[in-house]
């Protein structure tokens, strides 16, 4: 399984700092969160690298200091799976990227914490196109409100793009691009045919996300 290479001190935290607790098989690990996924000013996501080069992004969605969502990526950056932590069972419940996790009978037996894709495909405003393009169905519930809000797309170049509908209107508001070399670019939809880059960074050799603004 994936473990952080840093200190595994199990002291509690409030979720407002740069650490979060990841629970795996009943064991708790303290990992450093250095990526602000929801752009609220608090780091909420840690990217951990496995021995085989694969990565898992753990996110504290509800800001309680504990990881709630995990997204798995292979060594090329392709999304291979997702899961949500079920506090009732103490287990990570898989979310099937194809079904959206609504009827995953291969999980731990508990369907608590699984989300259903209540809306249709997420539409993307592509500059220069007369009509919005579909990114496919949302398969990940990033804000843990019971509705999947993020569609994941893999490109021919090996990049992974997450399109997130943050306001529930069926249209992507945020785009996160993870390139095969570990580079990360985050853009927000700021107007018709307009996407504005708000942050760039990369995944370092330890599997941590480093914003370019922290260089030097």
Image (cartoon, rainbow, N blue to C red):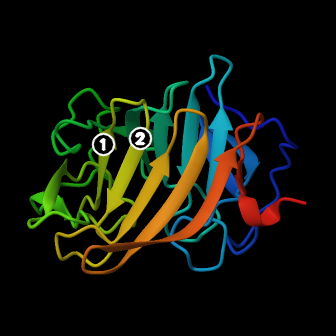
Element marked by disc 1: strand
Q: Residue furthest top?
A: 52
Specify the quadrant that holds the N terminus.
top right
Q: Residue at x 63, y 16 (%)?
A: 52
Q: Using the rendered image of the protein, determine whether residue 87 is visible from the camera's viewpoint.
A: no
Q: Is residue 172 above or below residue 107?
A: below
Q: Residue at x 19, y 36 (%)?
A: 98
The residue labelled by disc 1 is: 153
Element marked by disc 2: strand
Indicate the quadrant where residue 126 lies. bottom left
**First in residue order: circle 1 vs circle 2:** 1
Q: Using the rendered image of the protein, determine whether residue 198 is visible from the camera's viewpoint.
A: yes
In the image, residue 180 lies at what x, y percent?
53, 33
In the image, residue 139 lies at what x, y percent?
26, 48
Nearer to the camera, 118 or 187: 187
Nearer to the camera, 163 or 50: 163
Indicate the quadrant where residue 213 lies. bottom right
In the image, residue 143 lies at what x, y percent?
39, 67
Specify the quadrant that holds the C terminus.
bottom right
- For marks 1 and 2, give the CA distance: 6 Å
In the image, residue 48 lies at what x, y percent?
66, 38
Q: Residue at x 44, y 37 (%)?
A: 159
The answer to whether residue 168 is left or right of residue 76 is left
Q: Residue furthest bottom?
A: 191
Residues at marks 1 and 2 touching, judged by CB atoms closer than 8 Å: yes
Q: Residue at x 84, y 59 (%)?
A: 215
Q: Is residue 87 above or below residue 49?
A: below
The answer to whether residue 212 is left or right of residue 150 is right
The residue labelled by disc 2 is: 160
Badge 1 crowding class, 10 Å Cα cut-off, few under 14, some 14 to 19, many 20 or more, is some
Badge 2 crowding class, 10 Å Cα cut-off, few under 14, some 14 to 19, many 20 or more, is many
């Amino acid at each position: 399984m994936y473990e952080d290479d840093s200190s595994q001190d199990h002291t509690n935290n409030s979720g407002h700092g740069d650490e979060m607790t990841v629970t795996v098989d009943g064991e708790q690990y303290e990992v450093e969160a250095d990526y602000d996924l929801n752009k609220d000013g608090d780091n909420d996501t840690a990217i951990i690298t496995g021995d085989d080069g694969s990565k898992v992004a753990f996110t504290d969605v509800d800001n309680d200091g504990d990881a709630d969502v995990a997204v798995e990526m292979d060594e090329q950056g392709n999304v291979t799976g997702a899961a949500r932590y079920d506090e009732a069972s103490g287990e990570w419940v898989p979310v099937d990227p194809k079904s959206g996790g609504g009827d995953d009978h291969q999980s731990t037996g508990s369907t608590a914490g699984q989300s259903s894709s209540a809306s249709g495909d997420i539409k993307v405003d592509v500059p220069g196109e007369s009509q919005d393009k579909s990114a496919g169905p949302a398969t990940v519930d990033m804000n843990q409100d019971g509705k999947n809000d993020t569609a994941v797309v893999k490109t021919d170049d090996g990049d992974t793009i997450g399109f997130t509908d943050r306001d529930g209107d069926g249209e992507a508001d945020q785009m996160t691009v993870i390139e095969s070399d570990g580079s990360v670019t985050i853009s927000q939809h700021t107007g018709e045919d307009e996407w504005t880059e708000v942050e760039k960074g990369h995944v370092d050799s330890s599997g941590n996300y480093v914003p370019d603004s922290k260089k030097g």
